[in-house]
């Protein structure tokens, strides 16, 4: 019960989640990015100007559309991404060890209080 409600344990658990998120965020800089965009319009033929003697709208005038896909990947950053990833992983290891320390301290405090009551 102490591990579920102790504020220090809860804070340490959230710090652990935060540092794991930083690792994921840092790793995302090294993977390819994909962006897609598109647009479609339907235009009423009454609003399209046409010259006399022509059949009216031609080609893509009545339903213009476009689509694009862009893929990009970081090729070289001078070691910035690698160093940031190593630092994020190190911070994650520190957070894991801190969480283990807080849990062990909480268990010790609970056991000490229990045995004090028995004594």
Image: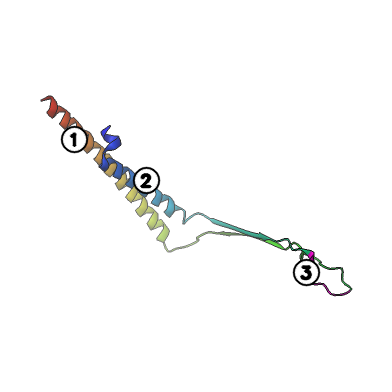
Q: CA distance from mark 2 to mark 3?
A: 57 Å
Which element type, helix, strand or loop, lies under badge 3? loop
Query: Residue at left 31%, top 46%?
Result: 95
Q: Disc 3 marks which residue?
A: 48
Q: Residue furthest front?
A: 46
Is residue 115 visible to the viewer in this orientation of the structure? yes
Quadrant of the rendered structure where residue 81 is? bottom left
Nearest to the eye among marks 3 and 1: give it: 3
User: Mark 2 = which residue?
Assistant: 17
90 or 101, nearer to the observer:
101
Q: Secondary structure at mark 2?
A: helix
Query: In whole angstroms, how far apart are the C-alphas of marks 2 and 1?
Result: 24 Å
Magenta segment includes 98: no
Which residues lie in the magenta part?
45-52
Q: Residue at x 35, y 54 (%)?
A: 87
Pointers 2 and 1 in contact (CB under 8 A)? no
In the image, is residue 50 part of the stretch drawn in magenta? yes
Secondary structure beneath label 1: helix
Which of the 4 image quarters holds residue 114? top left
Compare marks 2 and 3 and give the one earlier in the sequence. Answer: 2
Taking 107 as reference, is 61 above or below it?
A: below
| Quarter of the picture holding the N terminus | top left
Q: Say which mark, if any, is on residue 109.
A: 1
Residue 16, above or below 3? below
Looking at the image, the residue that sits furthest to the right is: 53
Mark before the other along the chain sequence, 3 or 1: 3
Q: Quadrant of residue 64?
A: bottom right
Residue 97 visible within the image:
no
The residue lying toward the viewer, choosing from 68 and 83, is 68
- Residue occupying the point 79% across, 72% down: 49
For marks 2 and 1 on the same chain, the one whose residue lies earlier in the sequence? 2
Residue 34 - label: none
């Amino acid at each position: 019960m102490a591990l579920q409600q102790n504020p220090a344990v809860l804070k340490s658990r959230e710090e652990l989640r935060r540092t794991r998120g930083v690792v994921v965020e840092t790793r995302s800089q090294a993977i390819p990015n994909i962006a897609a965009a598109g647009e479609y319009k339907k235009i009423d033929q009454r609003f399209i100007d046409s010259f006399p003697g022509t059949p009216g709208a031609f080609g893509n005038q009545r339903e213009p559309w476009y689509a694009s896909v862009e893929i990009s990947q970081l090729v070289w950053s001078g070691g910035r991404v690698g160093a940031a990833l190593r630092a994020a992983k190190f911070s994650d290891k520190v957070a894991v060890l801190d969480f283990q320390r807080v849990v062990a301290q909480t268990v010790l405090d609970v056991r000490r209080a229990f045995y004090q009551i028995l004594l």
